[in-house]
Amino acid sequence: AQSVTQLGSHVSVSEGALVLLRCNYSSSVPPYLFWYVQYPNQGLQLLLKYTSAATLVKGINGFEAEFKKSETSFHLTKPSAHMSDAAEYFCAVSGGGSYIPTFGRGTSLIVHP
Amino acid sequence: GAGVSQSPRYKVAKRGQDVALRCDPISGHVSLFWYQQALGQGPEFLTYFQNEAQLDKSGLPSDRFFAERPEGSVSTLKIQRTQQEDSAVYLCASSPGTSPGNEQFFGPGTRLTVL
């Protein structure tokens, strides 16, 4: 069985500050890991994914995430927040014979001017 | 190019009514997923199609929920005798292949409100 825990349902940062959204996963086999972003009234859009090619993954809009097997983590970061980054962010895990991803509960990113 | 589209975008149903939600995936995408997203939650898996075959329906919450993809493209999720607990956003996603490492492309969702 696989699961995802996103610590913090809301994260608030100032514009220009570092963004750190936490994701820990549980999987019995090497996983595929994803970060998706959801803007209001829209579907989810892929930010980046880990598929074992490299532990540091760069995505769109300046986001990146690092796969740390020892910590079972895949935290999402961005050096400098922009107002347009305000959205809901979801971490997801799949693999181990299952093509069905398991999503976390999401973290709402709030960016203050 | 065209992405995944869903219709209607909003649906209000009286308790006990039947509803049908449509998903148009990206052309040529083999895999199609349906999810239910409650307010403030992540997407919860409902069912999975590979072409026209429904390979997994383990997430459907009751036998009132039924999904089909008869020609391997458009899919319909049907909910019979709707209940208030069915109120949620229903998301459809498609993927070009069958690997669990494939990106999923999501539609905007259908927001169902059952009164």
Image (tube, coloured by chain):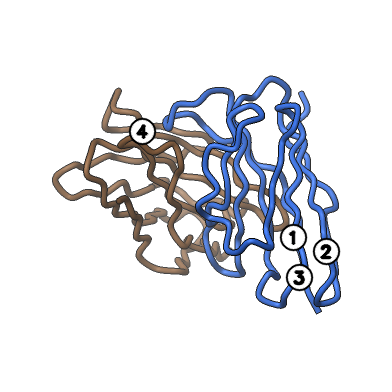
Chain colours: A brown, B blue
Q: Is residue A56 left or right of residue B107?
A: left
Q: How many marks?
A: 4
Task: Tell me the mark number nearer the camera, choosing from 4 and 1.
Answer: 1
- Residue at 68% in and 20% down: B28
Local SS, label 3: loop
Instruction: Tell me which corner region of the image, top left, top right, bottom left or bottom right, holds residue B113.
Output: bottom right
Amino acid under disc 3: Thr
Which numbered marker is on residue A51? none
Separation of marks 3 and 2 at Cα, in angstroms? 6 Å
Within 10 Å of disc 4 (Cα), the crowding (few <14, some 14-19, many 20+) is: many
Say if labels 2 and 1 share a chain: yes
Amino acid under disc 1: Ile
Along the line of sight, the residue nearer the viewer: A87 or B96: B96
Along the line of sight, the residue nearer the viewer: B78 or B109: B78
Location of mark 1 (residue)? B79
Within 10 Å of disc 3 (Cα), the crowding (few <14, some 14-19, many 20+) is: many
| Image marks 3 and 2: residues in contact by CB distance under 8 Å | yes
The subunit letter for the residue under badge 2 reads B
Separation of marks 3 and 4 at Cα, in angstroms? 39 Å
Which numbered marker is on residue A50? 4
Instruction: Tell me which corner region of the image, top left, top right, bottom left or bottom right, holds residue B11.
Output: bottom right
Say if labels 3 and 2 share a chain: yes
| Image marks 2 and 1: residues in contact by CB distance under 8 Å | yes
Location of mark 2 (residue)? B18
